[in-house]
Amino acid sequence: MSKFTIIIQMIRYSLAIPFLILFMGALLFIPAGTVNWMEGWIYILILVVYYILMTFYFIIKDPATLKKRRKLSSSKMENTALIIFGFFFLLVMILPGFDYQFQWTQLPNIIKIFGFSGLVITYLLNFWVMKMNSFASKGLMTHEDQVVIMTGPYKHVRHPMYVSFILLAFSTPIALGSLVSLVLAPFIPFFLVFRIQNEEKMLKKELIGYIDYIKKVPYRLIPKIW
């Protein structure tokens, strides 16, 4: 990729930052009834910093990863499942604002620090996964040149990207101080268990070497457990 193309891509992705801030601000501050919510701003700041570092890195080092990451499945059932998954994630995001406004359940600041630490770990893991596996896409699919990845986090579990989703689901309500939202977080792992089962059926059928990989790495999400 030429330097000119890299600059154009950086500008293109940079233009999305104000919309990202507005979108996240709407999800957090409208339910909260105020923009004077420090935890909400810290949450957005961490997300924006991650977005900038991650996208700029892959624009320079591996732009194909960003392209593949955006791809969705052609299956209507799969896309419907993603919509349902997104709905639960939206609830996890929206409820802390109402919780803050009406003071239903507010966690101590020390607990919130653990939540924000979990967010940072989540994004670091997500970056690591994408760096190791350029074939990771939103939809269930295999790519023409895809190979089995057995390096990085894939040496320990077969679906580290889903581990980061689970960490995000639990870290978000804790960071934003909401026990009400935390109640919904367990729905995310349950959804992902079903998705993993469907994904592995596809990979066993379509990806050469995946069955051998399962023998080498027997755990899906948590070493020694599952």
Image (tube, rainbow, N blue to C red):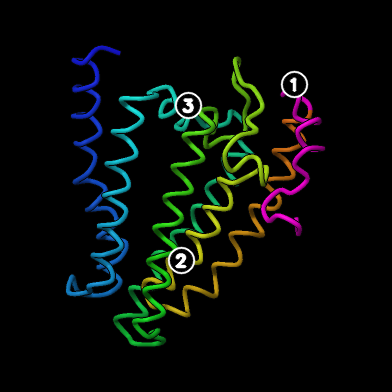
Q: Which residue is mark 2?
A: 171
Marker count (numbered): 3
Q: Which numbered disc, 3 or 2, marks the residue that appears first in the sequence? A: 3
Where residue 50 sits in the image (x, y, percent)?
32, 47
Q: Which numbered disc, 1 or 2, marks the residue that appears first in the sequence? A: 2
Tag 3: amino acid = Lys
Tag 2: amino acid = Ser
Where residue 52 sits in the image (x, y, percent)?
27, 41
> Which residue occupies 31% across, 44% down?
51
Instruction: Using residue 118 as the reference point, say whether residue 26 is left or right of it.
Output: left
Q: Quadrant of the C terminus?
A: bottom right
> Which residue occupies 57% across, 39% down?
152
Q: Which residue is mark 1?
A: 208
Q: Residues within 10 Å of mark 2 (few under 14, many from 20)?
A: many
Q: Which one is in front in this view, the residue at disc 3 or the one at disc 1?
A: 1
- The stretch drawn in magenta includes residue 212: yes
Circle 3 sits in a helix, a strand or a loop, which is it? helix
- Mark pair 1, 2: CA separation: 36 Å
Circle 1 sits in a helix, a strand or a loop, which is it? loop
Compare residues 130 and 76 and report the one nearer the observer: 130
Compare residues 84 and 96 and report the one nearer the observer: 96
Instruction: Using residue 113 as the reference point, say whether residue 153 is left or right of it.
Output: right
- Mark pair 3, 1: CA separation: 19 Å
Tag 1: amino acid = Ile
> Which residue occupies 19% across, 23% down?
7
Q: Which residue is mark 3?
A: 68
Q: Which numbered disc, 3 or 1, marks the residue that appears first in the sequence? A: 3
Circle 2 sits in a helix, a strand or a loop, which is it? helix
Please report the bounds of the magenta region as a residue range: 205-226
Where residue 213 sits in the image (x, y, percent)?
75, 33
Where residue 187 sits in the image (x, y, percent)?
61, 64
